[in-house]
Amino acid sequence: MAPGTEVESERIEYHTSTVLSVACCPDDQTVLSGGEDGTVTLFSSKDNTLIHHVTPGPPEPVNCVTFNPRETDKFYCAIDEEIFVYDKRKLNEGCCAKYEFHHEEINQIAVDEKGQYLVSCDDDGVVVCVDLTRQGGRCASKHTPHDNICASVQWVPGRSSEIVSGGMDCKIHHRDVYKSRPIRTLTERMNQQGAHIINPPFVNSVSTHPNSRYMVAGYGSGTVKVWRLGSRKVGYVPFKLLPQHNAGAGCVCLVDGKTVVSGGNDGFVHITDLEGGYSNGSADITSDEDADIDESSTFKLLHGHKINWLSGFTDTSTLFIYVCDESSVVTKYTVR
């Protein structure tokens, strides 16, 4: 931990069973969480007070939640194969739209920086792009880039129709939502011993940020890798390897364009400032080959439980991280 760093933790208890997802909207100081109890909670990031509870459909798990970065009154949540749209100004009226473009369980949803398109991925490896500017939403494109479960999808900053998606086929596809051929496919080396593959590098999570050219990926092997966006022809190229988790890196978040927060099945939260603020525990790379990493100065928080999801934001010199695990609690960490 960096000298002088202070960490405070708070427990936020609004769910009755495991919390599966969490998302921050720093612009209006609100946070969303979705749980196995079928509810979505909206609460204040300032004092953690509950603003509203919604139950989108039947009591089925809410796998993911997200805000619209341009229209911050809008938020979205996914249950099974459906996406529900809410307006914070009209919560008593229920959801204002519902999208049904998937046939398998949805794993992640993300809205582009202009707030005009939503992308979602599912257990069948399908990625759907929804045009939010059309009344009720319209399916703008639908592709199956992965041979297995697609676990995570995000928009590429500054490139209006480009996305990155990661899946259980151990691949990250960087592609245009309107084209079937990827711009680039990023793969990790398999750790093979004889006929057996040890800790396959399933892509559990990818993260981008509107103000950054970086993309971060968390792998089932515990690896956390940073890629940097190159030219349109080249796409993403390897940039850094970050300190590895002792079990799968289940979730990664690029908080402010330069701060990487990763949560592992080992119960640890790792924090790395790509510009050197929190930790020097990383290694520059120019290819897909592994590099030696100095673990000694890695900024780590022992959360103590397998992490399902995390999200965060910064305010001046303070980092706020919201973590959900196998319990019914959302933990808020304040790092100064």
Image: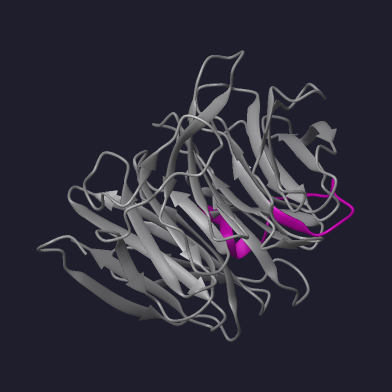
Determine the residue positioned at 11% across, 62% down. Answer: 3
Q: Quadrant of the C terminus?
A: bottom left
Q: Is residue 76 visible?
A: yes
In this view of the protein, which residue sits in the foreground, 244 or 78? 244
Q: Is residue 73 above or below residue 77?
A: above
In this view of the protein, which residue sits in the foreground, 312 or 222? 222
Q: Residue 8: x and y, percent?
A: 23, 74
Determine the residue positioned at 59% across, 64% down. Answer: 92
Q: Quadrant of residue 86?
A: bottom right
Q: Is residue 292 above or below residue 63?
A: above
Q: Is residue 27 visible?
A: no
Determine the residue positioned at 28% across, 64% down. Answer: 46
Determine the residue positioned at 26% across, 52% down. Answer: 279
In this view of the protein, which residue sits in the foreground, 182 or 317? 182
Toward the right, the furthest residue is 103
Taking the magenta stretch, the answer to whether it contains residue 182 is no
In this view of the protein, which residue sits in the foreground, 310 or 29? 310
Q: Residue 163: x and y, percent?
A: 64, 32
Q: Residue 73: x and y, percent?
A: 49, 48
Q: Which stretch did the figure color magenta?
A: 88-107
